[in-house]
Image (cartoon, coloured by chain):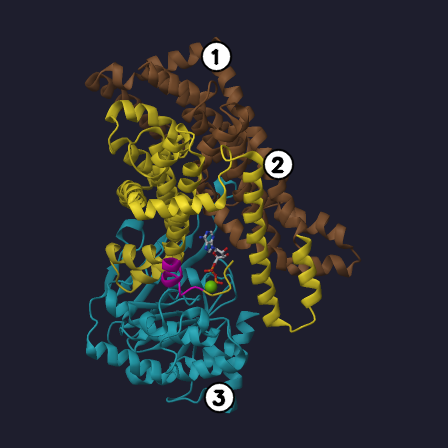
Amino acid sequence: MKRHRLLIDRILVCIALLALWQLASWYFGVYWVSTPRLTIVKFYNSMMSGEMLRHAGYTIEEAFIGAVIGAVPAIILPFTLRRLPGWVSVIDPFMVGGYGAPKLALAPLFILWFGIGIESKIALVASVVFFIEYFSTLSGVRSLDAKLVQMAQLVGANERQVARHIVFPGAVPNIFAGLRIALPYGIGAAVIAELISSNRGLGYLVQIGAMNFDITQVFAAILGATFVVLAVGWFVDETEKFLLRWRPPADSLMEQIHT
Amino acid sequence: MTAANDVVSSAAPAGPLISQRALIILGRCVFAGLLLWAWQWSANEFGIIFFAPPLAVVQRLYEMAISGEMFFDVWATLRISMVGFVIALVAGLILPFLLRLSARLTEAVEPFILWSQGIPKYALAPWLILWFGIGDTPKIVIVVLMVFYVIFITTFAGIRAVDRRLINMARIMGANETVISREVIWKSMQPFFYAGLKVALPRAVGACIVGEFLVSTQGVGYYIEHSRELSDTVGVFAGIVLATTLVLVINMIVEKMEKAALAWRPVDRT
Amino acid sequence: MTAPLLEIRNLGKRFASRQGREAATWVIQGLSFSVPDGEFLTIIGPSGSGKSTLLNMIAQIDVASDGEILFNGDNIGVLDQKSLKPGLDRRVGYVTQDDNLLPWRTTLDNVLFPLEVQGRLDDKARARAESLIKAVGLSGYEKYYPHELSGGMRKRTSLIRTLVYDPPVILMDEPFAAVDAQTRTQLQEDLLRLWEMGRKTIIFVTHDIAEAVALGDRTLVLTKQPTRIASEHKIPFGRPRNVKDIFALPGFAQVYESIRAEIQ
Ligand SMILES: Nc1ncnc2c1ncn2[C@@H]1O[C@H](COP(=O)(O)OP(=O)(O)O)[C@@H](O)[C@H]1O
Ligand SMILES: [Mg+2]
């Protein structure tokens, strides 16, 4: 009954938004804001022709490789340095600086170094993902419950076993919180790099649409990019849920502020 | 790396607490030196087309400061970022408080807000440029879009996290809704607000710089992109150093503000 | 005798069951009692018997499912959410189980909070706040934040935060449950001393028999769920009282024993 009402409310909001868009296209002209129908048809057609999927594939590939290159060292480093707090403090200001630095400003530099191909996008995504993931993992390793470690040592666990059975599981939520922020952001970074200079990918599709004054194409490509971001977010959430079955469900709104 | 390691082991027996701090500072200096050295080495190895040497970058920054170009560009970037930031801040703060008035509306629009968050906002830039031309407006809109969600979501989460018991307490003591919003909800939201601010302010500058890459005739982002087009690598590096410094300074200011505003919290916060 | 200040008639409460899996059970049912002006009433009941729920309904931060509550003879509607008036226009103060201090306000600012929101923050009010802070031994801690205070100090702060605006009825929900025995005795003494000065009506809920007897003019004993009144005990001691020596008074053991027998 109550769920029903909520569903109806949401459908109404959805219709209102689409109607607003339609009204805008009557008012400003289809040329400027396209229409919901045209955009969806265009999206459908370019899905069918495989064009959308091909470009999305490029973007996902860049984001995926970049995320792996950025995230793997970012996860390993805090574990390696767990027993060396002095080292963590030594590199801390540099990490904070790297975290705060506007990585997107590096896009021209990466294009200069690696050209307009996939490498420059991978480098940008990796630099974005690395710092976010480093600090997430670090806070997980740090917030580790000292009592649990003591307990494990009392029953005779060695250093490796402590890391494997206590530290790592304890940090998994933070690793995922980091990924939840870093991955969508990484995809965004790949799209931006494609916008600036590229010959393929969803960002390129947007740019081409804009150059041909084809707003429908722009919107269809943005729609595609949005689906990719949402799908990746969903995938991370589901994986986390699966890995963290033991944890009581928590409010994840706070984790979404970065996306 | 090994150099710092040797220092650690040889100086360790000296004194406990103070030497620890000194060692960390020393380690940082060594690390900074290593980074600089790696930079210089790369410049020699890859050539000035790819890697501008540190000294050349410093000299370029100096020239930019002397000619006033630096302040002109920084001001252009700051102006756009701040205008966009303020608009997004006001909207992102007010909207959740309005939504608080109707639980039904909040529930109805929530999924759309979360989904729209997934839109890669920068991808709208080419369209915005078609719409608004190449003036300030498309950049401001980009900044607003990038900042709004951060503020909105943190405010929303902050309002949700307010302790119901404190609100009840204030009601019992005769506080009206305005007072409750101001004295209880707003105050207990502060940690969320600053968490949002710390993400949002640097992001405003970053968004503005990206906007300047795509369309501009001034600003730090324009300087970087323009230098790249001229294959002026020293200029690219100088621009990036400038952008990074700008963002880091802003970060520092926000952190000072946060510290002052959240003095009431226990110090051992993580 | 004049009409009682507060009268509870046939009050009942049940919580909505979780997703309708089981029928809602009554936590409180058919509860009636009245409180004359100026009485120190203590209510004792086992944990989970609905004491907090009862006070929440009187303070009007929760709806009742049945019955009525009369204040000065007027029926204050408590059956639907919309007509609830938390604190009944500042006539009912509530010292809750948790201290509920605002963590971003110092001790003094927490005590001034009600006066501030009621728009009554003048020099006289300030002086009153300061004298209360002094009376409970918090002088010197005015500028401390709640997290810098001990549990007992926080309790004192939350206590005088309600006393400072002088509501005619004050509800207290196990205010001293979470502090150590020594501090508790001290807090009880402070409370009695402050009460002697104004003789407000107090409804004090506790699960500690000795506390109920030491503080109250009268003690109500509650049954297990669904909660009703099991018995009523007049406390035969005069005022002012000395909490520390109350155990030694003749008659204490008898009241204590008869209450304990009821609770078993
Ligand atoms: N919001 C609620 N929803 C469902 N049940 C509740 C709620 N609040 C209290 N209860 C139930 O009401 C009973 C009385 O609770 P409470 O008033 O807190 O008891 P007391 O204060 O005497 O320890 C308990 O059994 C508790 O489970
Ligand atoms: Mg209780």
Label 1 sits on residue: A51
Residue stretch rendered in magenta on the structure: B256-265
Numbered tag placed on residue C169 in the rendering:
none
The residue lying toward the viewer, choosing from C6 and A177, is A177
Tell whether A220 sits left or right of A162.
left
Label 3 sits on residue: C244
- Amino acid, disc 2: Phe
Instruction: Please provide percent x and percent y for residue A254.
Output: 45, 45
Chain letter, cyan in picture:
C
Question: At x 33% / y 74%, what residue is drawn?
Answer: C108
- Amino acid, disc 1: Glu
Mark whose residue sits in front, 3 or 1: 1
Label 2 sits on residue: A242
Chain letter, yellow in picture:
B
Residue density around tag 1, few if under 14, some if 14–19, many if 20 or more, within 10 Å: some
Against A185, is A23 above or below?
A: above
- For mark 3, give the secondary structure: helix
Mark 2 to mark 3 CA distance (whole Å): 58 Å
